[in-house]
Image (cartoon, coloured by chain):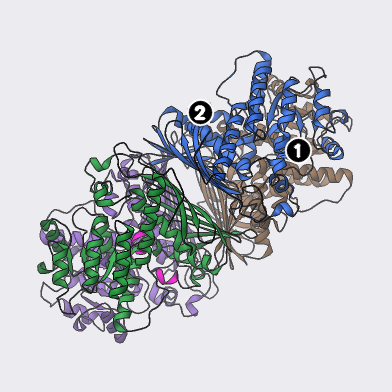
Chain colours: A green, B blue, C brown, D purple
Amino acid sequence: MGMIGGGGGSFIGPVHRMAARLDGMIELVSGAFSSDPAVSAATGKSEGLEPERTYADWHGMITREKTLPDEIRPHFLAIVTPNHLHYGPARMALEAGFSVLCDKPLCMSVAEAIDLYDTVHRTGRLFCLTHNYTGYPMVKRAREIVLSGEIGDVRKVAVEYFQGWLSSPVEKEGNRQAEWRADPSRAGIAGAMADIGTHAFNLAEYVSGLEVVSLSADLHSVVPGRVLDDDGNLFLRFDNGASGTLLASQIALGEENSLSLRIYGSKGSISWHQMEPNSMTVRWPDKPMQIYRTATSFAELGMAAGRHTRIPAGHPEGFIEAFANLYRNFALHIAAVNSGTAQDHILDYPGINEGVRGMKFLEASVASASEKSFWKNL
Amino acid sequence: MGMIGGGGGSFIGPVHRMAARLDGMIELVSGAFSSDPAVSAATGKSEGLEPERTYADWHGMITREKTLPDEIRPHFLAIVTPNHLHYGPARMALEAGFSVLCDKPLCMSVAEAIDLYDTVHRTGRLFCLTHNYTGYPMVKRAREIVLSGEIGDVRKVAVEYFQGWLSSPVEKEGNRQAEWRADPSRAGIAGAMADIGTHAFNLAEYVSGLEVVSLSADLHSVVPGRVLDDDGNLFLRFDNGASGTLLASQIALGEENSLSLRIYGSKGSISWHQMEPNSMTVRWPDKPMQIYRTATSFAELGMAAGRHTRIPAGHPEGFIEAFANLYRNFALHIAAVNSGTAQDHILDYPGINEGVRGMKFLEASVASASEKSFWKNL
Amino acid sequence: MGMIGGGGGSFIGPVHRMAARLDGMIELVSGAFSSDPAVSAATGKSEGLEPERTYADWHGMITREKTLPDEIRPHFLAIVTPNHLHYGPARMALEAGFSVLCDKPLCMSVAEAIDLYDTVHRTGRLFCLTHNYTGYPMVKRAREIVLSGEIGDVRKVAVEYFQGWLSSPVEKEGNRQAEWRADPSRAGIAGAMADIGTHAFNLAEYVSGLEVVSLSADLHSVVPGRVLDDDGNLFLRFDNGASGTLLASQIALGEENSLSLRIYGSKGSISWHQMEPNSMTVRWPDKPMQIYRTATSFAELGMAAGRHTRIPAGHPEGFIEAFANLYRNFALHIAAVNSGTAQDHILDYPGINEGVRGMKFLEASVASASEKSFWKNL
Amino acid sequence: MGMIGGGGGSFIGPVHRMAARLDGMIELVSGAFSSDPAVSAATGKSEGLEPERTYADWHGMITREKTLPDEIRPHFLAIVTPNHLHYGPARMALEAGFSVLCDKPLCMSVAEAIDLYDTVHRTGRLFCLTHNYTGYPMVKRAREIVLSGEIGDVRKVAVEYFQGWLSSPVEKEGNRQAEWRADPSRAGIAGAMADIGTHAFNLAEYVSGLEVVSLSADLHSVVPGRVLDDDGNLFLRFDNGASGTLLASQIALGEENSLSLRIYGSKGSISWHQMEPNSMTVRWPDKPMQIYRTATSFAELGMAAGRHTRIPAGHPEGFIEAFANLYRNFALHIAAVNSGTAQDHILDYPGINEGVRGMKFLEASVASASEKSFWKNL
């Protein structure tokens, strides 16, 4: 693969590289790691790239890499830049014949998202959006249980994503991760909702198998001087009539990365928490609650969870492994397409459609919040 | 004390009696336990009351009991009937010179609530409303910490109360607890919001020390055929500008009695969960999270928690003990007033003001929900 | 009932009284609460006893109370004194025709225990030993599951009871609870093993349905100057060949009252922890672990747990309620015997046999420890 | 690096390769992956090795690889074979000038261990033994706290390692992991004690900073037909006089990989559990318990934990990441030695001394168990 972004003090760049490396299937061969050519070069060097495969800008990179012979040309480009630099590189890469793996949220607007959606379908390239939390084995198992109908009709969804790292104005104190997230020109129309709300939204739709049709939002900029939302709550209505809530905050002081999902059906319910990702609870009205655990044989009946775990039960797999599952599934899909073999549809990963959904969610949320929580359709 | 309601298949009647009995300070001397005279008599007998102190109706009970000599007349009457039978007995008891302990919600409307408020103040009697969750030691400690300013300005409140016992139409299947709760003529304008939402609301205001000034509600009747809400979510705005959410459901299948509160401040945060009531977590930006535990010496610095616990740390105290704390505090207050001694204001308990707040909360919630979540002031 | 001990600064006296009072079935009518007549009188007064039913010493109490007419004579005496004052009052009470409820450990030696055992059987009186942890609903359920054979043959038992309150020499600093426990003339041949090790031992035998046949002990007096053990570990061998461990400590600094039990069978395993007593976990090789919860309908199939709970699931019942279950069951047994009705054997409680077992356990433990952990038979 | 073992159905081989790969610092360049040449070749091919660097046996591999020029010769060999194939390859590799990373336990006897110890010191090569659980950030932090004296003198150590995967005779049912572990000719003198007991022993010594001086063991072969122990318990005595227990089992049905450590000091205590590795609890007598969390700034004061984490708090790091920390630290040490730069002694890893300790532990345990738990010195 080639990488765009992820140099210097990036948080997500190294995560992508560890995830790509973990299973020994993907090799980083080129990169435009930063808008600062020196930073890009330094990152390329530390990653062991050949100097001529490290680029000063993504435009130049795509332009040249697409001309390379098949044997050395990357199969896909990973885009790990701030939000405003997703659309451009993604579109150019697709047009240049590359498949694309892109960080979330997809882009800056629904219009851009639809254009990318069209581009993906027109070019026939593959696209992965790193809603990485769907890569956890117990999330896969939860989805299987819900979709199987075991818990009956979904009646209620409660998803929540609380962090505390933006409780003070760290974007003005040198925190590079906070800087661009607090800047509308780089982050887009939303802050916390874009950064983590979209993850929560995606997780809820993925596990429930439902789509949100309308929402009412109450967004806040709690820390003085902050322009974008750093905290917000939503009422949700799903396409089957179920209701839900989505709570997301980056000023929930003391919270680390607390993403949780609960889905209540007419026959049972499930709950999962990202900070203890290897457990997933199923509750029933007439028998004891059950706790499924990663890598236990009985948790793998449907195969979905089992194919997303590497080591025996009780040896905790975490964030990097879940992230690596997306890379692995995406790489397997590319390999299957390239070799013309059958594609195993169990090994799913979030794609361009999830990207469009996320942008619709963001635009509806911001619109609702600006009209005193008036309900908006997606 | 005397008791109105709580006979036969009552859930809350026995709880009140256990709570009253636990500390050996309060004696049940009379009762009108049911609208069915036979049931009332049977309950009185099983409680060891003298037959002439067991009444066929509350009106007759108050009429006669108020004429009894001081030595045997109850100091207060406990009203543990369905909601529609709170106002009448409470008002008559107050006018008859009794202090009153009443189950929640206070009554059927804000108008009734204000009338009771006025009656309490006019008669000078004491009034306790059994928002029993405030009786837990760790809730007292949490309130102390928040009010002390240790966690800074409150920015965000997330309170949640999930149960699953109304996931099917049990009100039509002989469940007496469900029957009256599902019947507007006995429950009032709200279902889950009245039954458990008011507890969550009270807990949030109690621990935060803030008042909700406006709210937006999304209420649902999920189980087919049910008239009143059995599930609902609210956005909250507090008088200091903080925002919040209140989620309450009785169709969250698999949930038992899951009440939790989290309060996020500018310097720290607290969280507490009723189903593990003896722990309370405080998180900080710059040091390890702390877990306070009931009955540990250091948890009692402020005395509030320490005076609400009976046994050493690690010997779990539960729901009945917390409920008993309200009875104990109320009895101590009555005794102090009767004896003219100083009243220890630490040993607080919820009263008539909390009752008025709860009714305002209910009327605003129902009004908002009926207008597509339009924000309403309390 | 009448009570011997439990005056003044007693910890366990008030617990016994709350437990006795909770269900409204038992009335305290007399007491010799302390060896200090003034303390005894004061306790009697605060408990509302008639002055002539409060005694300066237990000998005088038993002598007079046995002469009282049936209607006012207590049905049983509760002995809540330090260990050295169990045997004498218990024996005299039994001989005087009273049933006896006694705190643990039963007495000071196996010889005394056997004598009490014989006395109970000779007099035909009932006897309850307050190994109160067996009163928890989930302990009842665990025992049912193990005895049913669901988890197969028991292979391994791990019981543990850690406290930290004796981490410093508080017995020399005015802590009355510690004083007598550290004094061999009042506590007996063992310290922590007598105080909490016997609870752990009883719990292991009760839930497993097995008897320990031999043990190897490693006991310690960790805090300088302490004569009796304050920490110790044992290997156990059960009568079916299973092995086990019993770890008990009162110098495990930071631990509150951490009693836990795990039993591993050939088909499954169970675990329970006293500090979260309303959950009990069952694990299986081929299906998800299950968590049973107090007061959920499915947890009550065998009726054992269901008859030991008072309120709906999720309303935590704790230490006092479990303790009250012993009192309630004992009182029901006495009432059944007195009225000649059938005795419901489900509502069991620990008795004189458990007392003898505990003393054998203590003598074997101390003997083994004094011989470098040489294995000893019970 | 080069690898000996880890082909075909190996569990630990892929773990080693993922751990080596994660941080992008170590490249696998050669291997003798199996005693079956075809398996070795297949593994080498799937790992992308050049065919001539894949060997049919380790002897041939070492013989040839040592002759390769510096630029392509591996800096160290990783030995991931069953226990009986540690000593031979390790010794030959050291003599051939390679540093060695070896799986645990070190070898088959104390005599072999001492010979390897001498060889390491004579050759001046570096040696890493993969007691991987010491690689967790919170284990590092726990050790720092204990060694700093914050919790006072260590009085009591309770370490436990429970698994359930050998609850049935899977070694006779085709489970390759179980086959060699149950075979004395390949596993050595002990079963569970060698496989997991040594991990527990190492963890206890590492975090406490103490050495076990004597022990008493009670070992069992629970599953019929099994020769080696599959369950066992030990009393421990440490060099400062503290006592301890080590419980290890592979027939604790339902347990996954439950390794936990608790250390009680005179001023505080710590506890850590491998299955929730990112939390570590510290308890105090006079203030609330604290929970340290991986990757929170305040958890990294001493730098030890901070240098062993990759991503922000709340993004769980697990087993592979901890394992990778050993590889990373070992590689950094080799690089520092090779480049002559200062060696950062914080970035420690278990080495040859830990290997000797483990073998002494095993021989003493087996000897004690064979003499009815007679105490043995290490």
Have a look at marks 2 and 1 and say if they share a chain. Answer: no
Eyeballing the image, is D29 above or below D335?
below
Q: Main secondary structure of the magenta part?
A: loop
Determine whether the residue tagged by mark 2 lies in a helix, strand or loop: helix
Name which quarter of the figure residue A314 lies in. bottom left
Check if residue B66 falls in the magenta segment: no
- Chain identity of mark 1: B
**Amino acid under label 2?**
Lys
> Relative to residue A346, is residue C82 drawn left or right?
right
Number of residues whose C-alpha sits closer than 10 Å to that of mark 2, classed few (under 14), some (14–19) or many (20 or more): few
Q: Quadrant of the C terminus of chain A?
A: bottom left
Q: Position of residue C152 (x, y in %)?
A: 62, 67
- Chain identity of mark 2: C
- Mark 2, residue position: C172
The residue sitting at the bottom extreme is D38
**Amino acid under label 1?**
Gly
Q: Is residue B214 visible?
A: yes
Q: Position of residue D255 (x, y in %)?
A: 50, 62
Depth order, front residue of A176/B84: B84
Depth order, front residue of B2/A78: A78
The range drawn in magenta is A303-322
The residue sitting at the top extreme is B340
Depth order, front residue of D48/C88: D48
Q: Position of residue A88 (x, y in %)?
A: 22, 62
- Mark 1, residue position: B6
> Relative to residue D287, is residue B166 drawn left or right?
right
Q: CA distance from mark 2 to mark 1?
A: 50 Å
Check if residue A306 falls in the magenta segment: yes
